[in-house]
Image (tube, rainbow, N blue to C red):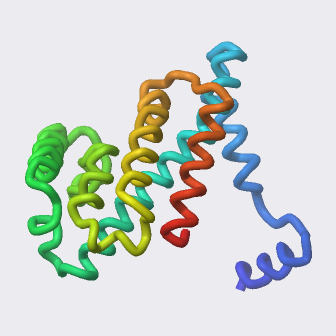
Amino acid sequence: MFEADAERFRTAGIRVGADQRDAERSLLEETLEPFGVDERNEALLMARLYALIYCFENAVRNLISERLAERHGATWWAQKVPQKVREFAEQRQKESTENSWLEGQKKDPMGFIQFGHLADIITNNWGDFSDLVPTQHFLKQRFEEMEKGRNFIAHNRLLLPGEFARLEMYVADWNRQVGL
């Protein structure tokens, strides 16, 4: 009952309860407080790009999983993923399980492949993705350039604004192609 009334007030523009954005901002400020202003500003700048790459990479993983499962059934992983990619993922998955103190997703093998493997899987199954991606050249060129930027982000290095624009453009191109 309260939620229904609260939603009615929110719809009318009346603030109800704690604002989650303010709480998140406060927690972030508290977490970053020990560091210098320059490092905090750079971190916040890069956080936006990290979020973009995180969403992109996981959306591609989901697209591959869903498309191949839909077209090839539950055994798509064993049938459609190149052996070297499967072996890589299975080894990383095994290591993750052995390091059980580290919490996180451990069941889906797609979570253990590298960024570059995504393009390999799509290329090896081109017939299943050619209706979404214009050419293999488009796929490889975009993914190779995005991987370089992704690795900068993953290793906590600051990218320049032009690289932000390039990555944002490539993600937008991809999203238009696949209908996101």
Residue 128 found in image quarter: bottom left
Q: Residue at x 29, y 68 (%)?
A: 65
Nearest the camera: 76 or 124?
124
Residue 40 found in image quarter: top right
> Relative to 80, does residue 144 appear above or below in the rendering?
above
Whether residue 97 can be seen here: no
Q: Residue at x 16, y 77 (%)?
A: 74
Q: Position of residue 136 (x, y in %)?
A: 35, 57
* 92 horizontally vs 128: left or right: left
For this orientation, the residue located farthest to the top is 36
Q: Position of residue 120 (x, y in %)?
A: 25, 52
> Relative to 123, does residue 90 appear above or below in the rendering?
above
Whether residue 127 can be seen here: yes
* 50 horizontally vs 143: left or right: right
Nearest the camera: 98 or 158?
158
Q: Quadrant of the N terminus?
A: bottom right
Q: Quadrant of the C terminus?
A: bottom right
Q: Residue at x 60, y 56 (%)?
A: 172
> Relative to 1, does residue 172 appear above or below in the rendering?
above
Q: How many numbered discs sit on the rendered protein? A: 0
Q: Residue at x 14, y 44 (%)?
A: 88
Q: Position of residue 140 (x, y in %)?
A: 37, 48
Nearest the camera: 142 or 35?
142
Q: Position of residue 163 (x, y in %)?
A: 60, 33
